[in-house]
Amino acid sequence: EVLNDAIYERNSVIERDYGVTLEYVYEDDYGKVNSDMSTAVLGGVDDYDIGIGHKYPFTSCAQNNHLMDLGSITSMDLTNPWWDSACYKNLTVEGKTFLMTGDILPSSMMISACLVFNKALNERLDKPEPYDMVREGKWTLDAFNELTADVTLDLNGDGKIEYTADRYGMTSWMMDVPFSMYYGAGGMFCKIDEDGIPVLDFDQEEMFNIYEKIYQGLITQQAYFVTDGALYPTTYEPFVAGRALFCDITLSKLTFLQEMDQDYGIVPVPKYDEYQSDYLSFVNGASGLVGIINTETRADFVGTILEAMSAYNYANVSPNMFEICTKLKSARDPQSSEMVDLIIRNRIYDFAYWFDLPISN
């Protein structure tokens, strides 16, 4: 509610100051966003000024040359602090940027990977809270695996570990945790070379070492690792019921925990080791992106509006969103508020992930 009110106020200010009317066309089917934009380009019409979508399948608009290079629009400066610098760096091709995100889309900032832990269960198992480890730079995959090593347990003694009755070291979803932990540990599949071209460039030994640790935490230690799409909602059930120590999640999905009686804390995804300088937060394909269709006839004017909307959010909306929506409603202690700042500070985008580049030996 607070966020919706802030966005409404933003729109009112932009309409008043720039003499425009903001008209939103919503589609429940995100594929329809893609097809409408493609139809506009192929028909040479200028029905929409701005397109907003996410990875599935919005990036195909860029691949099909249906979007403008945002960097070529003189009224836009993608180095401004209200644009996501990591997105700009890693999704720009030969100096051309077709998709961007940042403060203009507060919901995108919430698509930042993190972990939550059950504070009561953590205390009952006599485990150290990870906050100090995070602050000291010691929150690593090894530290995480050590905390969760002996937690999964057949509580009802029926010889099976099931999400409906038993306890887990972690709960997780197959489309999130293999990515969030890999990228959190500093892994990347694609790098931008000196000519601005994305190239597959990764150290296979490094990748193996990262996934060996992830495999230990997920498979060897019997985390609840959901691989059936029909069971996706159950990903969070053991954690909400107080039968899981950790849960891999994004800030946007903390709403799944709103019925939880016990307090939980929020921490970044673990680093690979203590030598890794930063905690890194993977941004998955649900993150919103903005683009301008290449049939747009008033690109500089549209760029001016985008900059104004972004700058307003940076100054007025994002601070309130992080303080009220993210920290106070979802994170139930001051330490978690501190952790949220770490989580949103270093967001990671990999060109290979966003554009589905095939990777093989």
Image (cartoon, rainbow, N blue to C red):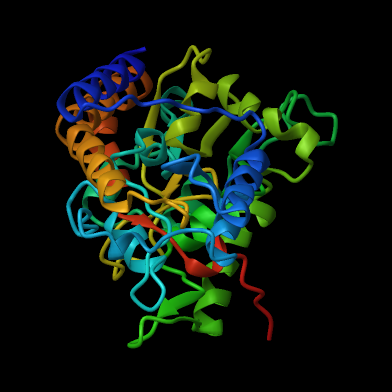
Q: Is residue 313 visible?
A: yes
Q: Quadrant of residue 205?
A: bottom right
Q: Is residue 213 visible?
A: no
Where is residue 162 drawn, in percent x and y? Answer: 77, 32
Up the image or down, 356 lies above or below 257; here it is below
Where is residue 173 drawn, in percent x and y? Answer: 64, 43
Where is residue 275 drawn, in percent x and y? Answer: 29, 71
Quarter of the image where the N terminus is located = top left
Q: Nearer the viewer, residue 84 or 204?
A: 84
Up the image or down, 317 lies above or below 88; here it is above
Q: Nearer the viewer, residue 205 or 21?
A: 21
Q: Quadrant of residue 163?
A: top right
Q: Residue drawn 70% across and 28% down? A: 234
Quarter of the image where the C terminus is located = bottom right
Where is residue 12 drawn, in percent x and y? Answer: 25, 18
Q: Nearer the viewer, residue 108 or 244?
A: 108
Q: Residue drawn 50% across and 84% down? A: 203
Residue 106 left/right relative to 48: left
Residue 66 left/right relative to 104: right
Up the image or down, 77 lies above or below 201; here it is above
Residue 120 left/right relative to 319: right
Q: Residue drawn 38% across and 85% down? A: 193
Q: Residue drawn 42% across and 42% down? A: 50
Number of numbered discs present? 0
